[in-house]
Structure formats: structure tokens, C-alpha cells
């Protein structure tokens, strides 16, 4: 007979999170594209568009500093999307049936899968920050980094839930582009490149209603200035909303698997 | 040889159009970047030193085209690697199919897809207000550069696939493709690039290809940049096709 | 599925026999809560599969047709993960995992990644994972498909041992011999329906008679040969051009007269075999067709 209760649920989540880490620890070279891509994006964008920082009204010392947070969010988004791709692979290979046969409640199983994404997203972010600091981006302070870490972990969770819904619907890795494009697009249709005032009218309108804008600004504040509650609470609220919305959809999708 | 190449090209085209995961990145991702770049960086056209254009879209279309063509090369490589992994390549090698047709077929299909990619972005640009200032001649030039460049990038993809032999390695090339593109004048004028990107861009064939595509769209026809673009594209195509033929020979020696 | 009614007593091995596509796996997936039934109800280990799926999952072990394993993990890690998911106390996880690994004969390979395992090893690991939490009911979906004869026999012994220990086993198979050897009771399924139900012995007795299989030296006038032996029993469908098969009215006593009749008519018999009723005969009687597994050559054995 199995043991029920919170302690067992936590054990289940921990075991599934450990399994999720195998994707970066045991797949030779498999993690590299996901870890490298946000850094490449940051370095490349700042090489191409660096002069944009000379625009009047640009709120950072240089373009690279301004887009470091974009890279961190991209890393979280890619990690979340990869969670969905891995789940689709598990479905195709049959391992997912084994998971569905476990007596744990479906939300607990989902938490284990999503939890691994929260941990894994710290890897591309760490690599990005190391390169960014080496290239001269100034140190934002421990508080700002801790807040940034919390926000990107939350974003990875939301992205993983979104990708999980797609994986459970399409049940094939061919849905990977949908998962990746979804997270990628939502991060770019924000104040990714320039402050709000410098965006085109139509992009400003989208950025204003895109919750990801608040999350981005919450991560960015320490890099371009000071961390304030005024910039932090909208980020936390937006993230809570994203996690709640996609989490609910993902739980529903999991519960519809079998009985 | 011709019949075999055409038959293999037809197959490659058919399979390509049936696999959404190969098709989607070619247009979705560059379109997305194009939209965001234009929406986010429109004001950069006011920076001192930025060439006179009607809008940032006019400038960025060439970047989107170049990016799309590069991703086409990656997709061709992935398709080739899937053929190798799945055994179809061995089946071809064991048949009377001329060896060269294995590469030429892929490259031929890629040229058709490249034409479609260019047309897509021209139409997209037209819908959102960017016209080709060079007129019909300009459109033909853009098509020519695009097809030759797309062919070259696909030959590169084939070469990588023949050496790597598995699709996930080829897919891992994607970030590197972005690197090469960023250190060119595809996205931003060469004179406004940060160091050391500006130095690299001067020697990067993608700069000349992108500038060649951009000239007739944003500025009107001018022989020098358009010829340079065509020459750079042809250079890439010839070098890449030669390398892929060498890679094919190397692989056949092992089997 | 077209209506499945069955009952499996506790501690019994129930065999679910049918050809590919009959609905065996679909039935199993419904009973183990992986597929929501569109009608009817089912209770496993005392709990309703649709209303109380978690309770069902706690009490069942499942080894599906395709071994559900993670190639990146080692055998030990997988078994221990399964133990954790099923709530085995942390202190007991490692010991219990080692015990099951040894039981299925994978101790040597326990620390290797599953991606390096052969098909037979994967099946054994899958079984270990199904047994880790001592389930009341064990579902085995075609567990020996693709296994070499030695591995198949090992698995049969394991099934018998589990039955002796009181575990209820629901076994699907397309192999007649497997059903015959292992099942206490059988359900034969075709096209989504159960066409026969009972013990192997009772089902075969229903069909009744032994039959004589003959191979003629010259098959050029097979229809005339059939006419010659028509009076001795019912003619059965032949599987190839020089094969005669006759259900015998009076058993072995009919053999000599049949041979004499054929000899008198000028036919030489190259081979003959007296066969007792098989489950394939049962299937044939119920559906008019041979069971696929009986008609196909034996599967290519895979070394484990």
C-alpha cells in the first residue's frame, strides 16, 4: 500500500524533478543549444543594434544592459518549451503511460515536471550573466539578481505549463515549433528592445496589455536602476496570473488523460 | 543524372511541404523577428549615419529574407540527416542513382523553396507598405540573389548532415547560424555596428548578400551592391556545393 | 469495443487471447485507467476504474505491450523512482529496488542506462517496475512478444510464482501455447467482442474432436482426394495446396480406414499427424477464422 499525504506528494515532485535534470546532465550536447541561444541572442542583438542606445529617451547606459533581461526571459521560455518537447517525446516513447499509472494526483505529477523547468532555467541565465558581466554589464546587486531568478523561475513554470498543454494535445514532438514560437513571441512583443516611449504605436499597444512586459520590467529594474516595489508588484502579479492561467489549463489537460 | 536529380528534388519538396516542423521555422521565426524589430527599432532610422529609407521595414526585409534562407539551409540539413538516420540514404546509395544526384536533388529543391521564401517576404512587405523601388528588374534581382544564396545555404546544410549524420546535431547548428547573421550588416547598417561586429561584417558574405537584397527594395537599383550580392551568393553556393560533394565522397568511402 | 463482460477471481491467472487488432490492449488500457471507457463500468481490485482511478492505480501493476521506460535512466534508478512514486518508505526504496532487480535477473545490468538494454531486458525491467509495490492485480499486455524461448519460459515461471503468491494476473497474449500453459481461465476476443469464455480444457472440450492432418505426395487432384475422405468427418479449411485436414468422428480409429480409402483411390500420403483440439480450433469454431498467431511463423527470437 502507498503512503498518502503532503510528504509523499513532495517526494514524488522531488523524484520527478531529479529525473527532469537528466535532460541537461545526461544528453551529450543536448543542453548546449538551449543554454547558448539566449546568450548568442544577447550578444548578437547588441552587436547589431547597439547604437539604438543613442536614441533620446533610452533608459539604460548601453543596449546590452538593456537587453540582458530579455535573454534571461528567453532562457526561461526556451526551458519551458523544452519541457513540453520532452513530455511529447515521453508520450511517443511510452514513458508517459508509466507516469499516468502512478497513484499520485495529476497536479502533483505536473508539479514535478514543471518544477524541473524552474531549476533548469537557471543554467542559461547563469551562463548569460557570466558573459554579460565579462562584456561590461554592471553588477545589479544581489537583491536584484534574487528577484530576477525568482521571476524567471516563475516564467519557466508558466512556459512549461503552456508547453505541457500543447504536448498533451498534439502528443508529438512535431509540435515543438509551436511551443517555442509561443514563448519567444510573447517575450519579444514587449519593451524588449527599447523603452515603451520609443516603441511604434502598435507595438506599444500590445506591450501595454502583454503581461510579459511587467515581468520583463521586473527583471530589468535592477540592471537599469534600483529595485522598487512599484516595479516589482506588477511583475509578481503578472507572473502569478500567467502561472495560474496556464497551470489550470495544464492541470485540466493532465486530468483528461485516461480516467 | 538530370532525371534522377529532378525526381529526388520532387521528393524533397513534397516531404518538406508535409513536415510542419521543417516548414514553420523558415517563415514564422524570421517574420516574428521582422515584426518585432520594425516595431521596436523604427526610431533608429533617425540615428545619425542611418541611410535614408522610407521606413525601417524597407531596411529589415532583406534581413528577414537572409535569415529565412539560412534557416532553409538548416532545414535542408535536418531533412538530409533524417534520410541518413532513417536509412533512405543507404537505399539510394545501393541503387543505380547517380551519386551526385543525391546532393543535386536536395539543392534543386532548396532553390525552389528559396524562391518561395523570397516571394513570401516581398508580398508581406508589400502588404505592410514596403515596395521594391527597383521595380521589376529589382524584383528579379532579389529573386536571383535569394535563390542562389538559398541554394548555397542548403548545400552547406547537406554537407553538415553528411558529416554529422544525425538530425539533432544539425539542429544544434541553429544558434551558430544566428551568430553569423548578427555579425553582418543584415539587421543594421555596417557603419552603425558595434565593434568588433563591424570588422567581422566587412568580411562576412552574409553582409553582401543582405545588402544586395536590400538595394533594389530600399534604395532602387544600383549595379555595384547588387552584383556584389550575387557574387557573394554565388561564391557561397559554389563553395558549399563543392564541400558537400566532397562530404558525400567521404561518406561513400566509409560505406 | 463491442461489449466486454468478464469476471476475474482473486488469485487467478486470466488469459485474454486474441489476434492483433482484436481489442486486447484497448481493454487493458481501460482497466488500468489509461483510457476512459465510453460506456459500461469496470471494477478492479474492488474499485471503479472511472470513479476511483487513483485507488485502482495504487493496487495494480502494469507491464504494457511497449515497455514504458526512460532510456536516460539506469535500471536501478527507474525501479527506485517507481518505488518512490508508489509511496514506498524512503528507507526501503533501495532495498526493495535491488530485490526486484535481482528477481528479474538484471543485477549485472542494473547500473547501465536502459537505452543500452536489449528488448528482453527492457521487458524484465518493465515487469520489475510493475511489481515494485506488490500489487494485488498485475496486468501483463503481451509480455513475451519478441522474446527468445528461454526468456519466455522464465517469464512463464514468474507468472506462475505470482499466482502462487496470491497475485491476480490479467494476461493478454496472441500465443496459444502461452494461454494454454498459464491461464486458469480464458477469454477469447475477436473484433472487440468476447467470443468464448472458460478454462482452456473446457473450451477445447467444447470443440470436441481430434483431427487428422495429411500431406499428399501429389496434390494435382486435391478435390477428388477431398471427396474420398468426405464421409469420414468434416473437412476443415486447408492452409496450402497439398494439405488435407479432417475432423474425425471416431477419433484415432478412423485413421486406418482413411488411409485405405486414399490408397484405393490412388493417392499416396507423404505425411500424417493426429492433432488434438487446440485453442485455435476453439477460435476457428467461434469466428470461422484461424487465430493470427497460429497461422504466422514463430517470431524472430531476441537474445536477452
Image: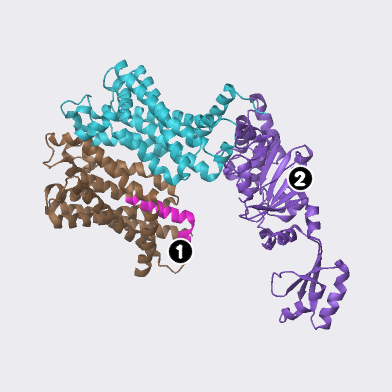
Chain colours: A cyan, B brown, C purple
Q: Is residue C36 above or below residue C274?
A: above
- Neighbour tally class for label 2: few under 14, some 14-19, many 20 plus, Cα within 10 Å: few
Query: C252 left or right of B46?
Result: right
Task: Determine the residue positioned at 14% across, 47% down.
Answer: B218
Q: Nearer the viewer, residue C184 or B182?
A: C184
Q: CA distance from mark 2 to mark 1?
A: 48 Å
Magenta-drawn stretch contains B76: yes
State whether residue A156 appears in this view: no
- Circle number at residue C157: 2
Task: Determine the residue positioned at 48% across, 32% down.
Answer: A251
The chain containing the residue under callout 2 comes to C
- Neighbour tally class for label 1: few under 14, some 14-19, many 20 plus, Cα within 10 Å: some
Residue C91 at what x, y percent from top left?
66, 24
Callout 2 touching callout 1 (CB < 8 Å): no
Badge nearest the viewer, 2 or 1 = 2
The chain containing the residue under callout 1 comes to B
Judging by the rendered image, the residue that carries numbered circle 1 is B93
Give the structural element (helix, strand or loop) at label 2: helix
Magenta-drawn stretch contains A233: no
* Label 2 and label 1 in one chain: no
Residues shaded magenta: B72-94
Task: Determine the residue positioned at 32% across, 37% down.
Answer: A185
Residue A240 at what x, y percent from top left?
39, 24
Q: Nearer the viewer, residue B174 or C277?
A: C277
Residue A8 at what x, y percent from top left?
59, 25
Query: A89 left or right of C69?
Result: left
Query: A7 left or right of C5?
Result: left
Q: Nearer the viewer, residue C27 or B26?
A: C27
Magenta span dominant secondary structure: helix
Give the structural element (helix, strand or loop) at label 1: helix
State whether residue C22 appears in this view: yes
Amino acid at each position: 500500500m502507498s503512503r498518502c499525504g503532503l510528504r509523499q506528494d513532495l517526494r514524488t515532485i522531488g523524484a520527478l524533478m531529479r529525473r527532469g535534470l537528466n535532460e541537461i546532465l545526461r544528453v551529450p550536447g543536448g543542453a548546449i543549444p538551449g543554454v547558448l541561444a539566449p546568450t548568442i541572442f544577447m550578444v548578437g542583438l547588441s552587436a547589431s543594434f547597439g547604437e539604438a542606445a543613442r536614441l533620446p529617451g533610452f533608459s539604460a547606459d548601453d543596449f546590452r544592459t538593456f537587453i540582458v533581461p530579455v535573454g534571461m526571459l528567453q532562457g526561461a521560455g526556451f526551458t519551458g518549451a523544452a519541457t513540453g518537447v520532452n513530455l511529447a517525446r515521453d508520450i511517443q516513447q511510452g514513458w508517459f503511460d508509466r507516469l499516468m499509472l502512478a497513484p499520485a494526483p495529476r497536479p502533483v505529477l505536473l508539479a514535478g515536471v514543471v518544477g524541473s523547468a524552474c531549476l533548469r532555467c537557471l543554467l542559461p541565465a547563469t551562463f548569460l550573466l557570466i558573459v554579460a558581466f565579462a562584456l561590461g554589464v554592471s553588477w545589479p546587486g544581489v537583491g536584484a539578481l534574487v528577484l530576477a531568478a525568482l521571476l524567471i523561475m516563475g516564467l519557466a513554470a508558466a512556459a512549461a505549463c503552456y508547453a505541457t498543454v500543447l504536448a498533451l494535445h498534439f502528443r508529438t514532438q512535431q509540435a515543438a515549433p509551436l511551443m517555442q514560437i509561443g514563448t519567444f513571441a510573447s517575450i519579444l512583443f514587449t519593451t524588449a528592445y527599447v523603452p515603451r516611449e520609443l516603441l511604434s504605436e502598435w507595438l506599444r499597444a500590445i506591450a501595454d496589455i502583454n503581461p510579459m512586459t511587467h515581468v520583463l520590467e521586473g527583471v530589468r529594474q535592477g540592471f537599469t536602476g534600483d529595485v522598487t516595489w512599484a516595479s516589482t508588484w506588477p511583475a509578481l502579479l503578472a507572473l502569478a496570473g500567467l502561472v495560474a492561467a496556464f497551470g489550470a489549463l495544464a492541470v485540466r489537460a493532465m486530468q483528461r488523460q485516461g480516467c | 543524372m538530370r532525371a534522377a536529380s529532378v525526381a529526388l528534388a520532387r521528393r524533397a519538396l513534397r516531404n518538406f511541404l508535409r513536415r510542419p516542423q521543417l516548414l514553420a521555422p523558415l517563415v514564422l521565426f524570421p517574420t516574428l523577428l521582422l515584426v518585432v524589430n520594425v516595431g521596436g527599432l523604427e526610431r533608429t532610422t533617425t540615428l545619425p549615419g542611418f541611410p535614408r529609407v522610407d521606413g525601417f521595414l524597407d531596411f529589415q526585409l532583406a534581413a528577414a529574407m537572409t535569415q529565412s534562407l539560412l534557416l532553409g539551409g538548416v532545414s535542408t540539413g535536418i531533412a538530409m540527416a533524417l534520410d541518413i538516420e532513417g536509412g533512405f540514404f543507404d537505399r539510394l546509395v545501393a541503387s543505380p542513382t547517380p551519386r551526385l544526384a543525391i546532393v543535386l536533388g536536395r539543392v534543386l529543391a532548396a532553390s525552389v523553396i528559396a524562391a518561395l521564401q523570397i516571394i513570401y517576404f516581398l508580398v508581406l512587405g508589400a502588404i505592410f507598405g514596403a515596395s521594391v523601388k527597383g521595380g521589376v528588374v529589382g524584383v528579379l534581382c532579389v529573386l536571383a540573389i535569394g535563390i542562389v544564396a538559398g541554394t548555397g545555404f542548403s548545400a552547406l546544410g547537406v554537407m553538415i548532415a553528411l558529416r554529422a549524420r544525425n538530425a539533432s546535431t544539425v539542429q544544434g547548428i541553429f544558434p551558430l547560424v544566428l551568430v553569423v547573421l548578427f555579425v553582418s550588416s543584415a539587421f543594421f547598417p555596417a557603419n552603425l555596428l558595434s565593434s568588433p561586429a563591424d570588422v567581422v561584417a566587412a568580411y562576412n558574405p552574409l553582409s553582401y548578400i543582405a545588402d544586395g537584397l536590400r538595394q533594389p527594395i530600399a534604395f532602387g537599383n544600383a549595379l555595384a551592391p547588387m552584383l556584389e550580392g550575387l557574387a557573394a551568393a554565388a561564391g557561397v553556393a559554389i563553395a558549399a556545393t563543392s564541400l558537400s560533394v566532397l562530404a558525400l565522397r567521404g561518406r561513400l568511402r566509409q560505406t | 469495443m463491442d461489449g466486454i463482460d468478464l469476471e476475474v477471481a482473486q488469485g487467478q491467472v486470466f488469459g485474454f487471447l486474441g489476434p492483433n487488432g482484436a481489442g486486447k490492449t484497448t481493454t487493458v488500457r481501460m482497466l488500468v485507467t489509461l483510457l476512459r471507457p465510453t460506456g459500461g463500468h469496470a471494477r478492479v481490485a474492488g474499485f471503479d476504474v472511472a470513479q476511483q482511478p487513483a485507488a485502482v492505480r495504487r493496487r495494480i501493476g502494469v507491464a504494457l505491450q511497449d515497455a514504458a521506460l526512460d532510456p536516460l535512466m539506469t535500471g536501478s534508478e527507474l525501479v527506485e523512482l517507481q518505488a518512490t512514486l508508489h509511496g514506498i518508505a524512503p528507507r526501503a526504496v533501495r532495498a526493495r529496488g535491488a530485490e526486484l532487480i535481482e528477481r528479474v535477473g538484471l543485477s549485472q545490468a542494473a547500473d547501465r542506462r536502459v537505452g543500452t538494454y536489449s528488448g528482453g531486458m527492457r521487458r524484465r525491467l518493465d515487469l520489475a517496475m510493475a511489481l515494485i509495490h506488490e500489487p494485488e492485480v498485475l496486468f501483463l499486455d503481451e509480455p513475451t512478444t519478441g522474446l527468445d524461448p528461454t526468456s519466455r519460459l522464465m517469464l512463464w515461471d514468474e507468472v506462475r510464482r505470482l499466482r502462487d503468491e496470491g497475485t491476480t494476473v490479467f494476461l493478454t497474449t496472441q500465443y496459444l501455447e502461452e494461454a494454454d500453459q498459464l491461464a486458469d481461465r480464458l477469454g477469447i476476443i475477436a473484433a472487440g467482442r468476447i467470443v468464448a469464455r472458460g478454462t482452456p480444457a473446457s473450451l477445447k472440450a467444447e470443440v470436441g474432436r481430434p483431427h487428422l492432418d495429411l500431406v499428399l505426395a501429389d496434390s494435382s487432384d486435391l478435390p477428388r482426394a477431398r471427396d474420398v475422405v468426405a464421409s469420414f468427418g468434416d473437412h476443415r479449411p486447408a492452409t496450402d495446396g497439398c494439405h488435407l485436414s479432417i475432423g474425425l468422428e471416431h477419433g484415432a480409429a478412423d485413421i486406418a480406414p482413411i488411409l485405405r480409402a486414399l490408397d484405393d483411390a490412388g493417392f499416396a500420403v507423404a505425411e500424417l499427424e493426429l492433432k488434438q483440439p487446440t485453442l485455435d480450433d476453439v477460435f476457428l469454431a467461434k469466428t470461422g477464422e484461424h487465430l493470427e498467431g497460429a497461422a504466422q511463423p514463430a517470431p524472430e527470437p531476441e537474445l536477452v
